[in-house]
C-alpha cells in the first residue's frame, strides 16, 4: 500500500469481503456470447471477450506462476528462513518467531512420522480455536505428508463422529476443552492416536501454566474427560525434537486438506484440496493484494477461525508468505477484549465477517482505535451489508471491497480492485488464472447483463469430494468447470454480481447451514411428523434458521424442540424461530417446497 502514492491512513485502505458457498489459471473466460466446447471445456473466443483484464489493478498479472512452489511446505519453509527472527504468530501477548515455528513444526512432524508411524496421505484432525498450537500442528502434519482434516471445535458429538468416520482420520489434536466430546465418539471412529493440548501450552512460564489452571479450575471451562492413552502436545514436541526432521516428497497432486462442506446437499462432504490448489489460491490472492503490503512489516489480526477455509488461506497461507505477524484472537465474541487488543497493536490487516465488523462498529471504544497503520481489512464467509460498509468507511476511512469464494475453490474466485473508492455491491473481478462464466440452464454462456449460474475453472478448484464420486459429478464437469449453484450476472467491465442462491443453503455469520441436515436431525424427534428449514434475515448474523414443523404429538412445544436442537446441533445451526403448521407446501411428487415458505416469509416481512 505504500506503492503508487497511497498513504497509510488514506481512503485507499480497503476491506475485502469473501462470500459464497463455503461459508473465497488458464486464460479467463468471459460470461459473454462465447462458445464453449463441452467436451474439453475450452472457450472458443478471443481476449476482447474478457473485459475484466482491462480493469485489473496495476502490477497484477493475468496469470500466476503455479510452478513457484511444488507444495505448501515449500512456501512455509521459505518464509521461515526469510523471516526467521520476526514474529509469525502472537497470542495472549506472547509471540512465536518464524524460526520457533519452524523448529516446533519439525519436531511435531518427526513425532507423527517416527513415533506414531503415520504415513503420507494419512488423515489427521485438528480440533481447536485460534491458538499458537494450531500452526505448529498444521505445518507439522503437512511436513509429515499427512492430510489435515479441520474440525470445528464447537461440533456436537454427532457432528464430530460423522467427520472423523467419513475422513478416516487416524489421529487428532484436540484442545482439552473439547476432549469430552471426542471421548464420547472415539470408539466409533478410526482414531488411534489422541494428542491433547491445554490453552496455555506454548505461552511460556509462568503465564502458560497459570492460564491453563485458571481455565480448568477457576472458570470451569474444561468438562471432565477420560482418554487413557492420550499424549500431551508439549510431550509430543519434546519427543519429536530428539528426532530427525522428515523429508516427505510432495507435489501439486497430493492432498493437503479435507475441508468439510455441505456442497450442493446437506450431507457433509470433504472437499479434497491439494497442495496445488492451496499454492494456487495463495499466489492468486498474494498477486492481487501484495503490492499494497510490505513483506515482513505487516501485523494481521486473525479473528476468523483458522479451521475455516477463508482464514486458512488468508491468515495462514497468504499472510505467512508476506512474513506478517498474525495476532490470534481466540474468542472474537468477546468484543470488548477484542477492541482492547486492537488498541494495543499497530495492526495493518484485519480479516473478519460482516457480523464481526458490525459488532466491532457497535462496541464502545472501537471508534478510538488507531487506524493509521491499517492497510487492508479482509472479510469472509458472507455478503457484506451496505449499511455496514458505509459505516465502516466513516469510522475507519477504508473503502469496503467485496469478493467471492467457495470452500471448493480454496476459496478465492473474484475480488474487487484494492483501489476501489466506494463500496459497489459487486463481488469483483476474476482472480489471475481464473476462468469465470455465467451459464444458462442448458450450460450455454449468457450475454452481458443476463443472469445464470456462476461457474468457475482454475487451479484452485478442488479435486473433488472425498469418496463421493456421485456428488463430485454433480458439480464438476468433464471440462473442469465447477458449478457453484449461485445465480449471478456480469456487467460490461467484467465485474460480477451475485443475484440469488440457487441452493437452499443458509448462511449464518459466515458459516454454511444446510437445511437437509437440520431437517434430518429434527425429524428424529418423536413428536415431529414433518419439518422444513429455511433461512430468514437477521440483523446480527445475516441469516438465522427458522423451522416449520407439523406435529406428530399434539403436546410438542417450542421449548422442548429448541432444547433438543441445542443438544444435537452446533450453536449457529440451531433454529431461532419455530412455527407449527398443520401442513407444509409440497410438489406433486411430495417434495417439500422450501421456496414457498421463503416467499411467504418475505411477504409477511413486507406487511
Image (cartoon, helix red, strand yellow):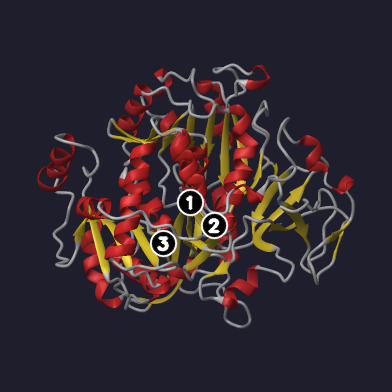
Picture layout, residue 10 above or below residue 308: above
Residue count near mark 1 (Cα–Cα under 10 Å), binned few <14, some 14–19, many ≥20: many
Which numbered dot is residue 495? Answer: none
Point out the tag, 1 or 2, that comes first from the N-terminus. 1
| Residue most extreme to the left | 217
Picture quarter containing residue 132?
Answer: top left
Q: Is residue 110 visible?
A: yes
The reply, left or right, for residue 88 in relation to residue 428 is: left
Which numbered dot is residue 149? Answer: 3
| Residue most extreme to the bottom | 589
Instruction: Work out whether residue 256 or residue 557 is closer to the camera in this orientation and state it.
Output: 256
Measuring 62% from the left and 23% from the top, which residue is drawn there?
12
Question: From mark 1 to mark 2, how far is it between C-alphas?
Answer: 9 Å
Point out the tag, 2 or 3, that comes first from the N-terminus. 3
Circles 1 and 2, Cβ within 8 Å, touching? The answer is yes
Task: Tell me the quarter of the image containing the N terminus.
Answer: top right
Point out the tag, 1 or 3, that comes first from the N-terminus. 1
Question: From mark 2 to mark 3, how far is it between C-alphas?
Answer: 14 Å
Residue 287 position in % (x across, y down): 64, 38
Residue 146 position in % (x across, y down): 42, 62
Which numbered dot is residue 275? Answer: 2
Residue at the spot of label 1: 73
Instruction: Work out whether residue 550 or residue 258 is closer to the camera in this orientation and state it.
Output: 258
Residue count near mark 2 (Cα–Cα under 10 Å), binned few <14, some 14–19, many ≥20: many
Amino acid at each position: 500500500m505504500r506503492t503508487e502514492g497511497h498513504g497509510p491512513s488514506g481512503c485507499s485502505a480497503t476491506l475485502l469481503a469473501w462470500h459464497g458457498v463455503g461459508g473465497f489459471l488458464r486464460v479467463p473466460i468471459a460470461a459473454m456470447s462465447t462458445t464453449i466446447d463441452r467436451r474439453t471445456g475450452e472457450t472458443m473466443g478471443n481476449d476482447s471477450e474478457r473485459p475484466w483484464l482491462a480493469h485489473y489493478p496495476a502490477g497484477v498479472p493475468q496469470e500466476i506462476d503455479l510452478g513457484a512452489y511444488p507444495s505448501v511446505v515449500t512456501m512455509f519453509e521459505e518464509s521461515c528462513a526469510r523471516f526467521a527472527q520476526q514474529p509469525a504468530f502472537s497470542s495472549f501477548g506472547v509471540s512465536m518467531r518464524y524460526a520457533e515455528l519452524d523448529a516446533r513444526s519439525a519436531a511435531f512432524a518427526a513425532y507423527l512420522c517416527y513415533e506414531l508411524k503415520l504415513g503420507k496421505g494419512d488423515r489427521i484432525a485438528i480440533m481447536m480455536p485460534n491458538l499458537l498450537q494450531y500452526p505448529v500442528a498444521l505445518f507439522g502434519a503437512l511436513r509429515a505428508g499427512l492430510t489435515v482434516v479441520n474440525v470445528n471445535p464447537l461440533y456436537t458429538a454427532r457432528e464430530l463422529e460423522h467427520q472423523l468416520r467419513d475422513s478416516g482420520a487416524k489421529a487428532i489434536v484436540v484442545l482439552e476443552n473439547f476432549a469430552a466430546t471426542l471421548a464420547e465418539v472415539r470408539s466409533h471412529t478410526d482414531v488411534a492416536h489422541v494428542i491433547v493440548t491445554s490453552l496455555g501450552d506454548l505461552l511460556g512460564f509462568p503465564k502458560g501454566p497459570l492460564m491453563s489452571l485458571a481455565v480448568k479450575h477457576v472458570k470451569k471451562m474444561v468438562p471432565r474427560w477420560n482418554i487413557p492413552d492420550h499424549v500431551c502436545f508439549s510431550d509430543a514436541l519434546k519427543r519429536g525434537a530428539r528426532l530427525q526432521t522428515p523429508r516427505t516428497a510432495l507435489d501439486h497432486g497430493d492432498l493437503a486438506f479435507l475441508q468439510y462442506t455441505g456442497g450442493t446437499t446437506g450431507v457433509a462432504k470433504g472437499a479434497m484440496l491439494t497442495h496445488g490448489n492451496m499454492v494456487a489460491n495463495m499466489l492468486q490472492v498474494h498477486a492481487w493484494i501484495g503490492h499494497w503490503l510490505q513483506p515482513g512489516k505487516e501485523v494481521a489480526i486473525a479473528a476468523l477461525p483458522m479451521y475455516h477455509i477463508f482464514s486458512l488461506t488468508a491468515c495462514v497461507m497468504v499472510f505467512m508468505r508476506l512474513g506478517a505477524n498474525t495476532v490470534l484472537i481466540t474468542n472474537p465474541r468477546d468484543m470488548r477484549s477484542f477492541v482492547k487488543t486492537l488498541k494495543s497493536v499497530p495492526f495493518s490487516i484485519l480479516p473478519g465477517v460482516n457480523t464481526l465488523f458490525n459488532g466491532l462498529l457497535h462496541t464502545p471504544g472501537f471508534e478510538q482505535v488507531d487506524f493509521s497503520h491499517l492497510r487492508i481489512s479482509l472479510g469472509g464467509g458472507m455478503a457484506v451489508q451496505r449499511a455496514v460498509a458505509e459505516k465502516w468507511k466513516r469510522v475507519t476511512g477504508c473503502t469496503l471491497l467485496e469478493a467471492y469464494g467457495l470452500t471448493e475453490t480454496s476459496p478465492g474466485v473474484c475480488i474487487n480492485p484494492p483501489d476501489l473508492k466506494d463500496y459497489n455491491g459487486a463481488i469483483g473481478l476474476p482472480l489471475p488464472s481464473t476462468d469465470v462464466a455465467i451459464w444458462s440452464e442448458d450450460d450455454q454462456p449468457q450475454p452481458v447483463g443476463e443472469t445464470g449460474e456462476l461457474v468457475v475453472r482454475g487451479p484452485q478448484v478442488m479435486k473433488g469430494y472425498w469418496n463421493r464420486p456421485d456428488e463430485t459429478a454433480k458439480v464438476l464437469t468433464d471440462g473442469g468447470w465447477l458449478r457453484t449453484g449461485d445465480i449471478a450476472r456480469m456487467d460490461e467491465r467484467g465485474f460480477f454480481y451475485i443475484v440469488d442462491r440457487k441452493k437452499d443453503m443458509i448462511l449464518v455469520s459466515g458459516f454454511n447451514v444446510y437445511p437437509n441436515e437440520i431437517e434430518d436431525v429434527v425429524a428424529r424427534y418423536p413428536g415431529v411428523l414433518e419439518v422444513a428449514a429455511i433461512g430468514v434475515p437477521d440483523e446480527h448474523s445475516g441469516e438465522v434458521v427458522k423451522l416449520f414443523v407439523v406435529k406428530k404429538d399434539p403436546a410438542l412445544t417450542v421449548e422442548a424442540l429448541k432444547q433438543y436442537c441445542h443438544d444435537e446441533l452446533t450453536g449457529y445451526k440451531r433454529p431461532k424461530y419455530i412455527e407449527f403448521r398443520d401442513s407444509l407446501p409440497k410438489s406433486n411428487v411430495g417434495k417439500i417446497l422450501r421456496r414457498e415458505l421463503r416467499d411467504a416469509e418475505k411477504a409477511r416481512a413486507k406487511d
